[in-house]
Image (cartoon, rainbow, N blue to C red):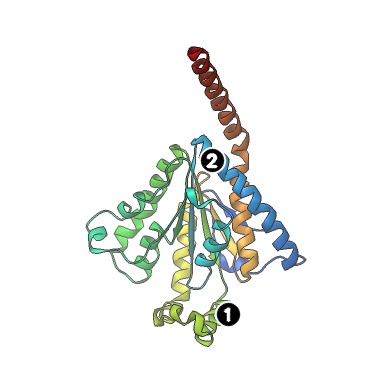
Amino acid sequence: MDFTVFDKPGAKVKLASISEKPPRGLTQEHAREEFETLGQELFDLQDLLWGSRQHSVLVILQGRDSAGKDGAIKHVVGSLNPRGVHVTSFGAPTPEELEHDFLWRVHRHAPRRGEFAIFNRSHYEDVLVVRVHDLVPKSLWKERYDHIRDFEELLAEHGTIILKFFLHISRGEQKKRLLKREEDPRTSWKLNAGDWEERELWDEYTEAYEEALSRTSTEMAPWIVVPADAKWYRNLVVARAIADALRPHRKAWQQHLDEQGARKRAELEAWRRGRR
């Protein structure tokens, strides 16, 4: 397994000790071939998920500016049937959202059984941005780690498969990507001085992410640290992790559909006999 998983609360997290780069020996061509194979598998698994309606899937993508949250969504979700996928991007809270608890706006977008929900940023902003910019008292955001674990436990107990990805980009690669946006007129719409301002708080965000990962990693809602300096490898790791999480359910989903199909055939035969 070429990615780091944290699945126990209190695990020591030091992002500096985790590589942002692909492993040596893996070529982009081999990664592309594996990604295509995984894409077909994910499509098939999603079809079983949709039909059996026994689980839902929540994918949370967090990361620094330019780490590739949009890119991961574009490539990995492209392997899925859009019929059962919902993508939500969370920005600054609206006035209405600020009048509720911090999880209110997130819970509304939790997936129904049979569906995928993809969060581009999430409730974790309330222990990241809020912390770094001192938007609420420390006594308040400190309590939120427990609320987040309870919230995710609630979702998991009701059949949601939760995968949380931190897209781990190096400071040097981030600078290259931000500068490239200025060079290419087609990406100028992404320019934001705020990205550079946030970059100046690199160490503060590192500390915030490390504590968030440590305090909210659980077996039911693990954090997966994705090396994100190479976009092609980032996409592969996200696809691998999702497939790994869904495979154990394949047999049960197929069995449920087979049983459902047998009942439907029996009902149809009974209806036909009644018309004779």
For residue 53, above or below residue 222: above
Residue 30 left/right relative to 246: right
Disc 1 to disc 2, C-alpha distance = 40 Å
Tell me the tag on residue 74. Answer: none
The residue pinned by badge 1 equals 172
Which mark is drawn over residue 49?
A: 2
Q: Is residue 272 left or right of residue 19?
A: left
The picture places residue 46, in percent across and down from the top left corner, at: 56, 45
Q: Residue furthest front?
A: 276
- Residue at the far bottom: name it: 183
* Residue 10 appears in the picture as rendered: no
SS at circle 2: helix
Q: Nearer the viewer, mark 1 or mark 2?
A: 2
Estimate the x, y position of residue 92 in percent, counting from the top left. 33, 67
Look at the picture and state if 265 lies above or below 237.
above
**Which residue lies at the image location 52% right of the left edge and 35% below the top edge?**
52
At horizontal 52% and vertical 37% (from top left) the residue drawn is 51
At which x and y percent is residue 31?
Answer: 71, 62
Work out whether 112 lies above or below 215: above
